[in-house]
Image (tube, rainbow, N blue to C red):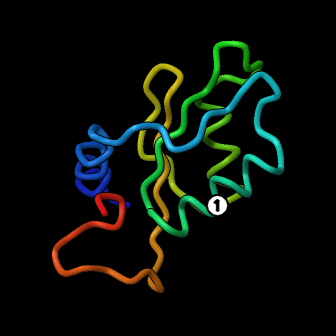
Amino acid sequence: MTSKDRAALRGEAHHLSAAVHIGHQGVTDNIVATIDDALRTRELVKIQLAKTTDETPRAAAARIADATSAEVVQVIGRTCTLYRWNPDLKRKSGVAPWRS
C-alpha cells in the first residue's frame, strides 16, 4: 500500500466509529474472528482498545493485522484502523463498502 493510499484511507476512517472494542483480556481468538468478519464485510475497520489492555495499541494492531492478513492504516492513541481488500464484496457504484 502506498502512502497516498494510506492517507486516503485515514481520511475515510476519520468518520467511522469503532466497530470492535477490545477489553481487558486483550486480543483473543474470538476478537480476531470478529475483526476478520468485519474486514470481510467492510474492508476498513476501526478498533478501540481498553485502557486496561496489557498490550500496546501498536503491538496489538500488528498482531491482529498478521492474523487477519490486513494492513495497519493508522494507530492513534488506543484506536487503530485496519484495511483488507475484499474482491468478492458487492459494491454499489461510487460508494465505499464501509459507508453503506
The quarter holding residue 16 reads top left
Kindly identify the residue that appears in the image at 62 percent across and 63 percent down: 37
The answer to whether residue 93 is left or right of residue 67 is: left
The quarter holding residue 85 reads bottom left
Mark 1 = which residue?
36
In the rendered view, would you say 8 is above or below 95? above
Check disc 1 and give the amino acid type: Asp
Kindly identify the residue that appears in the image at 42 percent across and 46 percent down: 73
Quadrant of the frame with the N terminus: bottom left
Q: Secondary structure at mark 1?
A: helix
Quadrant of the frame with the C terminus: bottom left
Foreground of the two, 38 or 4: 38
Task: Count numbered badges in the picture.
Answer: 1
Q: Position of residue 8 (x, y in %)?
A: 23, 52
In the rendered view, would you say 51 is above or below 63? above
Q: Position of residue 60 (x, y in %)?
A: 67, 35
The answer to whether residue 39 is left or right of residue 68 is: left
